[in-house]
Image (cartoon, rainbow, N blue to C red):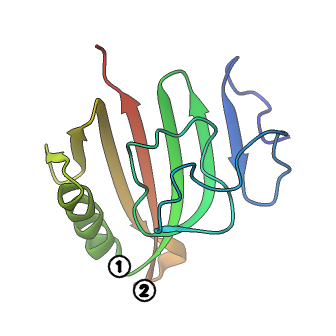
Amino acid sequence: PADAGAPTGHRNHVAGTPLPSGLPSGHPSGHRNHVAGTPLPSGFPPEVPPPPGRVIGASTGSGRWSVLLEVSGSAADVQRSSVAFYVQEGFHRESTSSVQGRGYRIMMIAENRDHSATVSALTVVVNRLPR
């Protein structure tokens, strides 16, 4: 199973594995960038739009959501464009791989998928900031 060995209260989803019942079929706010496929993690904050790409994996834990996206472009281009996407959405750039805003810190890392220079895997980790 997808969540075998996961800490209590932590749900993983890997493309091709069954989803627990009750997970949404898409982002609740209907963000236009989410390509149909694997749903975003349960409870994914509507204040945080996912960057463009196809969701191929997701997990969630207490105050944290992770999304794995397949995105067209080299890892370097995807990394830059993802940070720029969030800055355009009103988040504040902290570094070349993180932004902050709306009560969340978002960290991103891109790598070329299967040694491809034209398709990348982008991991986006959203953490709720302490109040």
Residue at image location 48% in from the left, 70% down from the top = 53
In this picture, is 127 found above or below 83?
A: above
Relative to 98, 66 lies left or right: right
The residue type indicated by label 2 comes to: Thr
Give the labeled residue for mark 1: 74
Camera-side residue: 116 or 91?
A: 91
User: What whole-number distance in Å separates the C-alpha atoms at marks 2 and 1?
Assistant: 5 Å
* Quadrant of the drawing holding the C terminus: top left
The residue furthest bottom is 118
Crowding at mark 1 (Cα within 10 Å: few <14, some 14-19, many 20+): some
Relative to 67, 129 lies left or right: left
* Quadrant of the drawing holding the N terminus: top right
Tell me where residue 6 appears, x and y as whole percent: 70, 27
Relative to 21, 120 lies left or right: left
The secondary structure type at the circle numbered 1 is loop
Give the labeled residue for mark 2: 118
The secondary structure type at the circle numbered 2 is loop
In this picture, is 124 found above or below 52?
A: above
Tell me where residue 5 appears, x and y as whole percent: 75, 27
Tell me where residue 66 appears, x and y as whole percent: 51, 43
Residue at image location 53% in from the left, 40% down from the top = 44
In this picture, is 125 found above or below 81?
A: above
The residue type indicated by label 1 comes to: Ser
**Does the CB distance between marks 2 and 1 fall below 8 Å?**
yes
Residue at image location 30% in from the left, 63% down from the top = 82
